[in-house]
Amino acid sequence: MRSEAKLMDHEQRDRAAQDISESYIVEASAGTGKTTILVSRIINLIKAGEARLEEIVAITFTEKAAAELKVKLRQELEKALPNEANSDEYQRISEAISDLERIQVTTIHSFCGSLLRERPVEAGLDLNFEVADDLTASLVQAEVWEEWLEKQMDANDPALRRTVLIGITTGQIRKVSQFVLGNLDALHYLPSPPAPEEVEKTIGQFTKSFQKCVSSLSELKKYCKNPGEDRAAQKIDQLNEQFVKLESLPQEEKEVFIFKEISMGSSKQGNQKNWQTKGHLDEVRNEIDELLKAHEEVRATIMDSVMAALAERLTDYLKAYEEAKRERNL
């Protein structure tokens, strides 16, 4: 007889199913046997007398998966029933089959709902609250979002205004809010935002670097034999124009200009034949490279500051959403 081929990870599967003395995390794509391992583990807990069905909670993502898991559990319990009717194992499995409806095989939402129903007052919930389905939750979110956004726009909220000015759309801000709603714990781990004076200092340092760079580039441009056609020479002119514009702006407008209007492009521009020596073009490229790095650093500082201020403001939206759910007993 041919022996049945074993899966490459059969040892890990067996260990996760049979070793009930340890906890395991099983990561795998759909249809690879996670439910089978879970069912086997439940049965082994019952066989060993480590738990009764009413003491076990099996949590899935969907109602369909929960129903399928319960059906599979019944089938496997019946298969596991030993022939010796007087054995402890027989009694445990037989009892489990009879008490199958006492096991909690449920979704995350339903399980959390059951816990909250046990302690609604402590959770600050109405006694008749309902668990919102995905559609209801998304509709409430959308309604609260529109109201919150309109209120912030009418008040010319500085954090929101600043976010939009650097080019982040309200649609993108909405996506950030949805991410925050799905990852509320992340708010506790946000890095401290750069202080306003730190942002201003970084912008000042960048402006000085910019000034030094365009000064050096202007000197180097004298060695270009064909500035009207050479891309590197044209880039020098463009950077000069951008620096003059940056210097003329009031402090509060420099942030937006640096983030949105200054375009660095690639430093690998220019044609060697248009320059007196290769060394001159290399110097131009090196200067632009250094400016590129400085520009990336100042943009990162601005973005960190803007997003931190936005995240702080979004906590108001989260509070409004929680209040809306309470009003609807959700």
Image: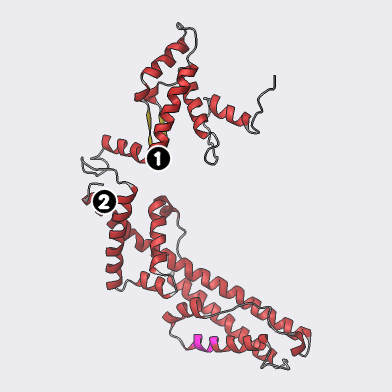
Front residue of this view, candidates 26 and 122: 26
Location of residue 85 by image quarter: top left
Number of marks in the rendered image: 2
**Picture residue at 60% right of the left edge, 31% below the top:** 12
**Residue at the location (66% across, 80% down)?**
287
Query: Percent x, y for residue 107?
Result: 38, 38
Residue at (49, 18) in percent of width and height = 79
Task: Assess whether residue 65 is covered by the magenta stretch.
Answer: no
Please name the residue that numbered disc 1 is placed on: 62
- Tell me the quadrant of the picture where the N terminus can be found: top right
Give the vertical position of 19 relative to 145 (above or below): above
User: Mostly what secondary structure, the magenta segment?
Assistant: helix
Mark 1 residue type: Thr
Q: Nearer the viewer, residue 307 or 110?
A: 110
Q: Is residue 229 above or below residue 157?
A: below
Closer to the eye: label 1 or 2: 1
Please tell me the numbered disc located at residue 325.
2
Residue 238 x/y as whole percent: 58, 87
The magenta region covers 242-247
Query: Could you say whether the residue bearing mark 1 is in a helix, strand or loop?
Result: loop
The amino acid pointed to by label 2 is Lys
